[in-house]
């Protein structure tokens, strides 16, 4: 299970260090793609396959289903962590997420999310304010 949040800076080659606590749960190649809310998703190949299965079962005749598949799949890249646990973030994904230098890596159960520091701070503040409402609406 991937948990926690960590702040790291991209180096001059667009590499981001993935914390050791999170790396223990990740092995082999990973998939990075556009995520929801203007963050990036990082998934193991196994979790990526599960997501693709869900997307593949959406009704092809529905415009939102086609759009979701295009955005998620066209934006996907395979990444492999180097010996020091760094991942290369493709330029177009870095731009999509608005990451200039500082990034926040968030463990969300079966995936990592990579956020720009600014967007994460905004999102986290709003989410904290609405936490009780969200729990109530989802009947947790």
Image: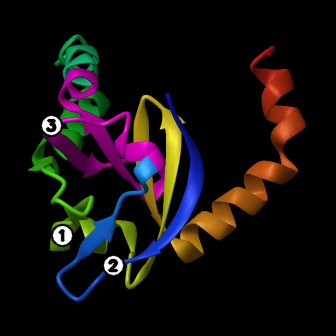
Looking at the image, is mark 2 or mark 3 earlier in the sequence? 2
The percent coordinates of residue 34 (x first, y second) are 29, 51
Tag in front: 2 or 3: 3
Q: Specify the label residue 28 is tagged with.
A: 3
Q: Specify the label residue 121 is tagged with.
A: none
The reply to whether residue 36 is in sight is: no
The percent coordinates of residue 117 (x first, y second) are 54, 74
Specify the quadrant of the image occupied by residue 43. Answer: top left
Disc 1 crowd rating (10 Å Cα; few below 14, some 14-19, many 20+) is few
**Distance in Å between CA atoms under marks 1 and 3:** 23 Å
Q: Quadrant of the C terminus?
A: top right
The percent coordinates of residue 87 (x first, y second) are 22, 61
Q: Nearer the viewer, residue 92 or 84?
A: 84
Looking at the image, the residue that sits furthest to the bottom is: 12
Tag in front: 2 or 1: 2
**Distance in Å between CA atoms under marks 2 and 3:** 21 Å
The reply to whether the magenta stretch includes residue 39 is: yes
Q: Secondary structure at mark 3?
A: loop
Q: Nearer the viewer, residue 2 or 117?
A: 2
The reply to whether the magenta stretch includes residue 45 is: yes
């Amino acid at each position: 299970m991937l948990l926690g949040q960590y702040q790291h800076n991209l180096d001059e080659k667009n590499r981001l260090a993935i914390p050791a606590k999170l790396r223990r749960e990740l092995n082999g190649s990973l998939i990075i793609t556009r995520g929801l809310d203007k963050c990036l998703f990082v998934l193991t190949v196994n979790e990526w396959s599960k997501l693709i299965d869900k997307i593949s079962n959406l009704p092809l005749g529905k415009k939102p289903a086609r759009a979701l598949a295009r955005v998620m799949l066209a934006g996907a890249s395979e990444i492999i962590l180097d010996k020091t646990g760094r991942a290369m973030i493709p330029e177009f994904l870095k731009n999509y997420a608005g990451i200039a230098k500082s990034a926040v890596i968030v463990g969300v159960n079966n995936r990592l999310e990579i956020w720009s520091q600014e967007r994460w701070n905004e999102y986290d503040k709003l989410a904290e304010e609405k936490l009780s409402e969200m729990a109530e609406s989802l009947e947790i």
